[in-house]
Amino acid sequence: MRLTVLAGGIGGARFLRGVRAAYPDATITAVVNTGDDVTLHGLRICPDLDSCMYTLAGVHDHRRGWGRTGETWRIKAELEAYGAEPTWFGLGDLDIATHLVRTRMLDAGYPLSDVTAAICERWQLGVQLLPMSDQRCETHVVVELEGARKAIHFQEWWIKHRASLDPLAFVQVGVDQAVAAPGVLEAIADADVLLVAPSNPVVSIGTILGLADIRAAVVETSAPVVGVSPIVGGAPVRGMADRCLPAIGVEVSAQGVGAHYGARKTGGLLDGWLVASGDTADVPGVEVRAVPLLMTDDEASAAIARAAVELA
Ligand code: GDP
Ligand code: CA
């Protein structure tokens, strides 16, 4: 069985662990958001790819929600001592090694998809991670700042300002020039089931679908498409989806996100929509099922993956 998953960072990563646990013999491919990517201190950083890689490798810090276990912060402290900006981004020593390898390969001319494959080789994930695109296509957030309307990088909005500034709009800089990375369109077209992870609908899934060729592939694939709601009981389980959805006029609920994704029959994304037990959704043309959706451990995540594939 070929399972392809659209994924962001932490929600995507935990779901991927569930898919792998539930279907160990399947060929699993993840198309991962790269809209959060950023260059800091000369290092190319891909937060969602790294969240997926570290989580699948079992070396992620579960409590912090990002980065490596056993991380240390000596380089970050030294950078701060030099007054080297920005100081607000968490860069751990172990994590920096990943960024150094990535940046070096990118500087040598390799595309991000090749670099990602090379970096993942070490970890033997059992899941192929594909960046959505080899081109830079970074999410910016339009905000009111110091009396002026400005577009700041997603990371600056999320980490430096802790999502405190009201987002007026999300903009994908470079999206018109960006195309799907090698393997992405094939993984969508050739899938037996296409799964949409419980990732942020705006700045993870929305970003991936912002690429015209990926959206077209999703609409056209013969595989059934089943999404998992990241909104449980009217709130995101973790993260800032409740700050992002209102900015695009979508209610923070399983119903709101399901309707926003829409039915594939009418040019939308979904054939099936898994919502959390206790939540409801009614989206014309979409089969809805309610199951427990908290990914507390691998077994819980695997049960969600099985429910999604069974619904498909
Ligand atoms: P990010 O890039 O690290 O923000 O991660 P994603 O975009 O992949 O995922 C963020 C989303 O994951 C948030 O909207 C959360 O509500 C959702 N999420 C996190 N943990 C869970 C969980 O246990 N169950 C469900 N259903 N959603 C979750
Ligand atoms: Ca992210």
Image (cartoon, grey):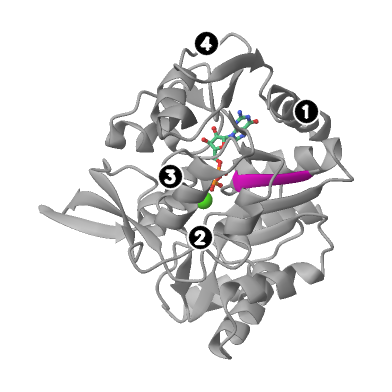
Sequence-first disc among 2 and 4? 2
Which range is magenta? 2-6
Amino acid of disc 3: Gly
Chain-order first, disc 3 or disc 4: 3
Q: Quadrant of residue 183?
A: bottom right
Q: Which residue is mark 1?
A: 306
Secondary structure beneath label 2:
loop
* Residue underneath mark 3: 206
Q: Would you say residue 296 is visible in this rendering? A: no
Q: Is residue 147 above or below residue 79?
A: above
In 3D space, how far apart are the residues under numbered discs 3 and 2 (Cα atoms)?
11 Å
In front: mark 1 or mark 2? 1
Residue of label 2: 34
Asked which quadrant contains residue 96, the reply is bottom right
Residue in view at x 89 percent, y 45 percent: 25
Residue type at tag 4: Thr
| Label total for image | 4
Marks 3/4: CA distance?
Answer: 22 Å
Q: Main secondary structure of the magenta part?
A: strand
Label 1 CB, ligand 1: below 8 Å?
A: no
Mark 4 vs mark 1: which is more N-terminal?
Answer: 4
- Find disc 4 in the rendering and name its residue: 280
Q: Is residue 93 left or right of residue 80?
A: right
Residue lying at the far right in this picture: please name it. 25
> Of all residues shown, which one is farthest toward the left?
147
